[in-house]
Each structure stands twice: as structure tokens, then as C-alpha cells.
Amino acid sequence: MNWRALFVGFGLLSLLAGCASVGKRDLSTFYAHEPRSIIVVPVVNESPEVNAPAVFITTITVPLAERGYYVFPVYLTELLLRDLGLPEAGLVHQLPSQRFFDLFGADAVLFITIKDWSTKYLILASSVVVEMKYVLKDTRTGTVLWQSKQQVARSSGGSNPIAMVVSAALNALFTDYLPLARQANIQVFRPPDGLPAGRYHPDHGKDRDRF
Amino acid sequence: MNGGNGWWRAWLANQYTLWQYVCLGLVIGAGPMGCTPPALYQWGEYEDSLYRRYVKEDIAGAEAYLRETLVAAELKSRVPPGVYAEYGFLLYRRGDYAGAIEKFEQEKRAFPESAALMSKLVERIQQQRETRGQTEQKEVPGGTGQP
């Protein structure tokens, strides 16, 4: 069985799905602090889609925890913050990072901003795009440990003009952004641009050459 | 009759390789699903439970999925981070304070990173228990603090 070929095929598929990532790769500060636990606070939404944060937040825990970090339960986090008088993601993002250590005991806080969450129409095709900015800060010092941007786009287009018009109209009603958000979150934490493996991952401490 | 025996053996061997091919075919067919590295945790219905809560605003469904996730994960492998805590919070909301404390303690044992928050929650529930009857149940243990 040629696993390598499978992986290559998989890689090509992801490329076809249209993913791009841009990020800064200076992990020396990250290694200096080596967070074990990460709290994901409510996301700021810069897209016009009101539902985007609710859909997005359901897809963040699994890929981050699977990188080996303790991820604070997102729903409980949101309720506790609301109880502290912080119902707005915008306000939470302005808090000094130290507060997340005092309140939750988290080593690092992940601020995510949704930059784009839309369906764009070309002449006879449509393209669904999600794009997020991720900033991870140390809670004791407020230093940025890692940041990245991730975009995932999927286009649908075809040769039959009538079918395309119909499907574009249907897509506008029932666009499912969930798989795209999930894919973005899986990709953004992976090497070489992602987060080094955390304490609970078998690669922890052994993957420095991959970043 | 050695020759007959040999024929059978050859036939069996052929069958064996045939099955090998069938199995190989199955594995290749399942390749796109199966070639991800093994997961650290048994996530079960966790994402579905969040989706129910956040997007569909179906609290009962969210709770059912969360309970299924916890039960399945406890049986099969490691319970993912946050699942004990979320379930404990669910119990707290139903007024099962003892159950809630037990789950928060389990989260703490499974993930020491959660210790500070879990201890805080347990402490607040205990305080609330002592004053139960005098105060209304709050949405979050402990009530108001400053951001």
C-alpha cells in the first residue's frame, strides 16, 4: 500500500479546495512560554453574517485539543464571561491578557476574528469563503506567542448555465459554512505554520524541525 | 493422492490472495477516511452538542449529545478536555450540586490545567449550598464579579 501516494493525493485535494495561509513564524517567544492550556474567548465578527461566530465556535475545540493543549470549555467560558459583565466579544478582546490568568488560570488566550464569511457570485459560479485571524497571547505577559491567518474557499461552477443559476440561488439559502470553518481550524494549527505539539501530544518536544 | 492435495492447497492459496486483494481494495476505498493520524480523544458527539446549543439553540438536544459523548468516552478512551466540566455545569443547572462538584473534580484530575477554575467553581457551589433556601439559584455559580 502506498501511503505516501495517498497523502500526496490528500494534499493535492486540499490544494484544489483552495486554502492559503499567511503567518509569522518566529516561535522563540512561544517556546519561551510554552503554554499548556489555551482559553478560546468569544470571536469577533467582521463579516456581515450574524450567525458566523456561533457556527465557528463549535469547530475550534477539537483541532486545538488534538494538537495537545488543554482547551477550556468554550460554552462555559462564554457564560462565565457574560456573568462578569462581558457579553460582547469586542469587550473581551480588549481585556488585558492577565485577566484570563486571574479568572481562569489559563496559560494563553486565543483571540479570533472572523474576517470573511460569505458567498461570492461570479458570472455563473459561486464561491464560499471563510477567513479568520488568530492571535495567541501569553496571559502572564500579554506577549503575542503566535499568530496566523487562514482562508478556506470552495467554489462551485459548471457548464450548464441554467443548473448553475439554480444552484447558486439554492446555495445562497443553504450555504453550509461549517465544513469550511472546520477545515480552516484543522489547517491553521498544523505544521509548518501552526502550533508546536502541546503537552498531551506524542510529538511534544520532538517537532521543532517541522516549524 | 498427493497431486489432489496439492491442487486444493493451490486453490486455497489462490482464495487467500483473492481475499487479500478484496481487503486491500477495502482499505484503499476507505483510505481518504482512514489516513488521518489517530485522535488523542474520543470526541463522540461533542461538536454536535455545541452546534445544537449555539446554532440551533436546542438545549435538550445539546445536553443529550453531551451526555452521550461523556459516557462513550469514559468507556472507550480518554475523555476530551472540557467535557467533564461542561457536564458538571449542566448538572449544576439542574440543581444537582453534588453531581456538579464530582464532575468538576474529575475534570481537575484528568487535566490539572483546569484546577484553578474548577476549584473556584466547586468553592462557589459549596458556598451556595450552605446558603441554599435563602438565595435564588444563579445562572453561573457565584454570581457577579468584576471583569
Image (spheres, rainbow, N blue to C red):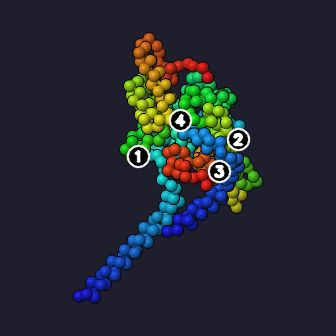
Badge 2: chain ID: A
Distance (Cα) linking label 2 and label 3: 19 Å
Which comes before the other along the chain, label 3 or label 4? Answer: 4
Asked if disc 1 and disc 3 are in contact, CB closer than 8 Å, the reply is no
Instruction: Please tell me which residue lies in front, B12 or B39.
Output: B39
Label for residue A115? 2
Badge 3: chain ID: A
Identified at 39% across, 47% down, the residue is: B76
**How far across and down, in percent of the image, does residue A104 sit?**
55, 29
Instruction: Please tell me which residue lies in front, B68 or A109.
Output: A109
Examine the rendering and report whether any part of residue A173 can be seen. no
Three-letter code, disc 2: Lys
Label for residue A72? 4
Identified at 47% across, 37% down, the residue is: B111
Same subunit, tags 4 and 1: no
Q: Which residue is mark 1?
A: B77
Q: Which residue is mark 3?
A: A193
Outermost residue toward the right in this view: A123
Three-letter code, disc 1: Ser
**How far across and down, in percent of the image, does residue A30 sit?**
63, 43
Instruction: Please tell me which residue lies in front, A100 or B41.
Output: A100
